[in-house]
């Protein structure tokens, strides 16, 4: 049993490098305020916002910072991405759409990025890469059965993996996704040569 409730949580200067499990080459910082209210103790009744006053991400030599103020809206058990865009060093990452937290848990998300493949090197010691990478992805379905439509395109990339030994130069790849199907529509480059 319960009635109406409201809460506000402010986090200032949270350093991602201090979080457990984050690789040494990954970091960043955020400050955000979550303001939530509910007429009854049910997730479907929660309404409010999460505002990011500061959001910066570092992966290896790449640093991205939010453009404007990132905003998530919560209403009737659904999170709606009001504004989320990171940019820096010729890279851009954008997220938009909705995700239901209750009921069918439907997803309607759109993710777009234009970033250098070298960002992956921040997450592993066994692989090095560089090259333009574009991702345009729409995620639908539900949390338990997501679907993805869109593509991943890598242009003129160099990739090397130490174990198992693999090296590719001038790699050009396009992977098209449609619901539950992935099609490698383009692949060229020099491998282990």
Image: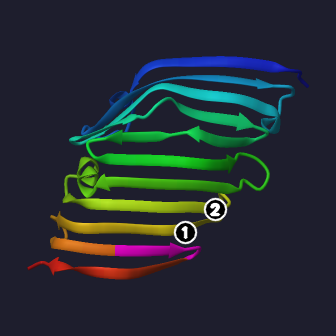
Does residue 7 appear left or right of residue 129 in this picture? Answer: right
Q: Residue at x 20, y 68 (%)?
A: 156
How many dots with numbers? 2
> In the picture provided, is 117 more to the left or to the right than 40?
left
> Relative to 188, does residue 103 appear above or below in the rendering?
above
Q: Is residue 121 magenta?
A: no
Question: What is the quadrant of the C terminus in the image?
Answer: bottom left
Residue that label 1 marks: 149
Give the residue at x 26% y 74%.
172
Position of 172 with respect to 97 (left or right) is left
Main SS of the magenta part reads: strand
Spatial separation of the CA atoms under disc 2 and disc 1: 8 Å
Mark linked to residue 140: 2
What stretch of residues is rendered in magenta?
174-180
Image spot of residue 57 (x, y percent): 35, 36
- Dot 2 or dot 1, earlier in sequence: 2
Query: Would residue 177 be counted in the magenta stretch?
Result: yes
């Amino acid at each position: 049993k319960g009635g109406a409730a409201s809460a506000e949580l402010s986090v200032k200067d949270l350093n991602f490098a201090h979080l457990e499990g984050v690789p040494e080459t990954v970091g960043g910082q955020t400050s955000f305020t979550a303001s939530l209210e509910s007429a009854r103790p049910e997730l479907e009744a929660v309404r409010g916002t999460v505002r990011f006053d500061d959001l910066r991400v570092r992966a290896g030599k790449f640093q991205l910072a939010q453009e404007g103020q990132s905003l998530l809206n919560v209403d009737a058990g659904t999170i709606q991405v009001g504004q989320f865009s990171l940019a820096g060093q010729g890279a851009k990452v954008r997220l938009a759409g909705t995700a239901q937290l209750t009921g069918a848990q439907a997803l309607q998300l759109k993710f777009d990025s234009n970033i250098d493949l070298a960002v992956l090197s921040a997450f592993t010691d066994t692989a090095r890469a560089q090259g333009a990478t574009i991702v345009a992805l729409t995620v639908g379905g539900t949390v338990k059965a997501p679907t993805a439509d869109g593509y991943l395109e890598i242009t003129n990339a160099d990739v090397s993996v130490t174990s198992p030994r693999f090296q590719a130069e001038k790699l050009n790849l396009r992977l098209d996704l449609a619901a539950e199907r992935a099609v490698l529509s383009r692949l060229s480059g020099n491998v282990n040569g």
